Image: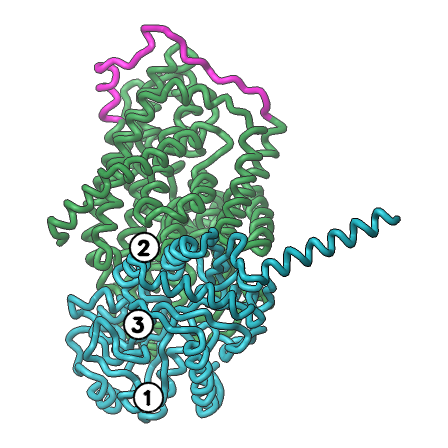
Chain colours: A green, B cyan
Amino acid sequence: MPEFGALYNAFSTALGWESIAVILGGVLLGYVVGVIPGLNRAVAIAIAIPLTFYMSPYAAISFLIGLSKGTAAGSAVSAILLNTPGESSSAATCLDGYPMARDGRPRTALKIGLLASVIGDLLATLLLIAVAIPFAAVALKFGPYELAAILVFALVFIAGMAGGSFLKGMAAGGLGIILGTVGMDPETGAMRLTFGYIELMEGVPILPLVIGTLALSEMFVQLDEYRRNRGQKAINLSDNQQDDLSWPEFRKTLPTIFRGTAIGAFVGALPGLGPSVGSFMSYGAAKRAAKDPERFGKGDPRGIAASESADNAVIPASYIPLFGLGIPGSVSAALLVGAFMIHGITVGPLMLREQPEMLFSIFSGMLVASLIMLAVGWYGLRIFARITNIPSHIVIPIVIFLCLAGIQVQGYGTFGLLVVFGFSILGYFLKKFDYSFVTFLVAFIVTPMLELNLRQSIILSGSDPAILLDRPIAAFFVVLTLLLLLRFAWTGLKQRKKTVPNAD
Amino acid sequence: MKLQSFLKTALVTGALAISTSAMADNFPSKPLSMVIGWGAGGSTDIQGRVLANVMSEHLGQPVNVINRPGAGGGVALQQLANNRDEGYTFVFGTSMSVTFGPLATPTNYDVDSFKYVAGVTLGQSALVTGANRAYSNWQELIEYAKANPGTSYATQLAFDRMLIEYIAKQEGIDLRIVPTSGGAGMAPLILSGDVEFAYSGGTHSGYAETGEMPVLASLADDRLVAFPDAPTLRELGYDIDPGDIRVVMVPKNTPEERIAKLAEALEAATQDPRFIEITEERILMPVVFMDGETVHEDLRNKVTSYQAIIEEMGGLSE
């Protein structure tokens, strides 16, 4: 159990000026990104990682987590005022948010969205802290056998659950695995798929890869869409005194918010599902639970509350497998792994033993971020409402510039630029043809870990599969993986297409 | 025509004048670049940035840090070998990249492609084990391994793999050598007891107080600062000096007096409390000052001894 001293230090770090400034910066930036429809969370984190190079590891991670939380709250603004979700995960917020804003109550709608976001986020963060630590304490006892088995299980699970067809999921995962094996063989030192590039010896550099596949390619997609929907106008916030949230009205949404938080936290904790699934599930559940479901879709505040609370609860909950097991379950968690790596930290259960203060500081920083989010959203309402009108032709060039500048900062030079462009084209087609992005990215990130643990298991056991009999946890996950594969294959055959929306 | 050729002459003379004045020892007269062969945020980078700061105060010119990660510091050295900046660009890195690197992978450089300004820090790597093992020192481990063929060892680098294979051959023991990446990959294997003993770059220094990761042997040329009881490989009877030194290097064509200027700045840095603090308290390695000649000689000897080992083993394992 953590010592009291460590907890105290953690909180004093998180409440220090530097920490609050960094988190505020992250949340503000995240909010802006969330509000602007063309910019999504993954793009923002990918291009923000280089900004964190010269921060302390704690500051860097808090900044990125604040950013990621901010996007989830900010995305409600454009969903409500513009009927275009700032993040795909706020699509469900449009359903009731936009009608409500059109009826002359935009401020009320925004405030419900904000409060639902903050409550969902705060409760899920508390859950993360409560669950991740005992989880990590157990996971610390895992050896290579358990880790290899769990990683394979997680990859298959993500491929099957991330939406679209299972085959496409597996294909995306396979591509990620192949890219993850580039570089020096960990055992023999042989060069794999490096094509003579000495820069590839340590693998495909993660930053150019994520900036290319996530950020730059997204700008191409945006350019594409920009030609089609130009000139949308957002609803303005009027000075109508009647348009404000009252306590009785808010109280009516509270049960929905708690239900949404629970759904979001559950969905978030499972790798691969992502916030879109969470918010739609929560919206559906709220509608089913209501006595007057016909009001949904016509500006019911409970619709906004359901969607936003779940959307925001997913983010902290998706860090449970990250901190508990070292497995990223979403795109933003995968990006955090990259950020941790750049700062020389391996995220996962070992942090609990080796850097408990850092881990607790990050957790306390996350709580601070929730509260800052409330303040930022509450007082910045009017400003953020304006930002929805920033046109893509301003956003896109700035983001492209930041993408390329980020690569230069890390020091990859022209080689890095080639990698970025190569992967931006790959990312563009992955998006166009609806290949699961989470699966691709998570597979890429965990492959080195998976390969190493698998090879360690094989060497340590002397290639004897009977070792699984001594390792019940590993055996359990191997069996579970096989069952999962059979099930996905079966449903895949039965209905060649699933209707789950794309994750994260 | 006349005017043009006049201009040309003027330009050429001007350029010559500038370059001679540069030679006349007002080096450095423009900003310098410290190239680091590892990504931003790693231990070499953290330390290098402080070093660059301190150096720039002494040299009176900014020292810009450039990261050129890749190939265990090899990408940076590859570029330095072709560099013609005559002292304005230098690499801060680990000596392992120049000694063992060229033996393990094809490179366009070797230990004599560079001049060494100075060594400023000594590596503290070690062979470590976990608590509650059946052995508590190196001799007992060797006995244990002889009695238990297939004793497991976790390797991180081609270098420590070579060392351990050499030792295994000398002792006639049969090991299961498992690959792992970095201290974060090694630590759980050792702490959980899945692996018997392992190479550790610096992770053990963080466990010095708890005793969860005892050191069996020092992989520095001398005993470790934090584990003075663990013997060196030479004390254990193996003919190897495995020590790693953090050094500043320049291309070999760099004028001597410029190297001397840089060395002065480095010597001052090794006495600067900021550099000492980041190195000894954060990275947990001792600060030293080894002059360039000594470093070069030492590294050459290491290369020769590694070559001998590789030959004796019949090449590096594939």
Closer to the camera, B82 or B165? B82
Residue at the spot of label 1 = B174
Specify the amino acid type for callout 1.
Asp
What's the magenta region?
A229-256
The quarter of the image holding the C terminus of chain A is: top left
Tell whether position A97 is magenta: no
Eye-nearest disc, 3 or 1 = 3
Whether residue A180 sits left or right of residue B109 in the image: it is left
Q: What residue type is labelled 2?
A: Val
Residue at image mark 2: A347
Circle 3 packing at 10 Å, graded few (<14), some (14-19), many (20+), is many
Same chain? Circles 2 and 1: no
Regarding residue A175, the answer to whether it shows in the image is no
Q: What is the chain identity of the residue bearing mark 3?
A: B
Q: Is residue B150 left or right of residue A167?
A: left
Q: Distance between the residues labelled 2 and 1?
A: 34 Å
SS of the residue at dot 1? Answer: loop
> Residue shown at 39%/30% (left/top)?
A31
Which amino acid type corresponds to the residue marked 3 in the rendered image? Gln
Principal secondary structure, stretch drawn in magenta: loop
Q: Please tell me if label 3 and label 1 are on a single chain.
A: yes
Tell me if label 2 and label 1 are in contact, CB under 8 Å. Answer: no
Tell me where residue A107 appears, x and y as whole percent: 35, 15
Q: Which residue is drawn at 39% across and 34% down?
A: A30
x, y (%) of residue B25? 54, 61
Q: In which quarter of the image is residue A91?
A: top left
Residue placed most toward the observer, A463 or B55: B55
Tell me residue B139's x, y (percent). 22, 88
Quadrant position of residue A298: top left
Residue B124's label in the rendered image is 3
Label 1 crowd bin: few (<14), some (14–19), many (20+), radius 10 Å: some
Question: Residue A241 lies in magenta, yes or no?
Answer: yes
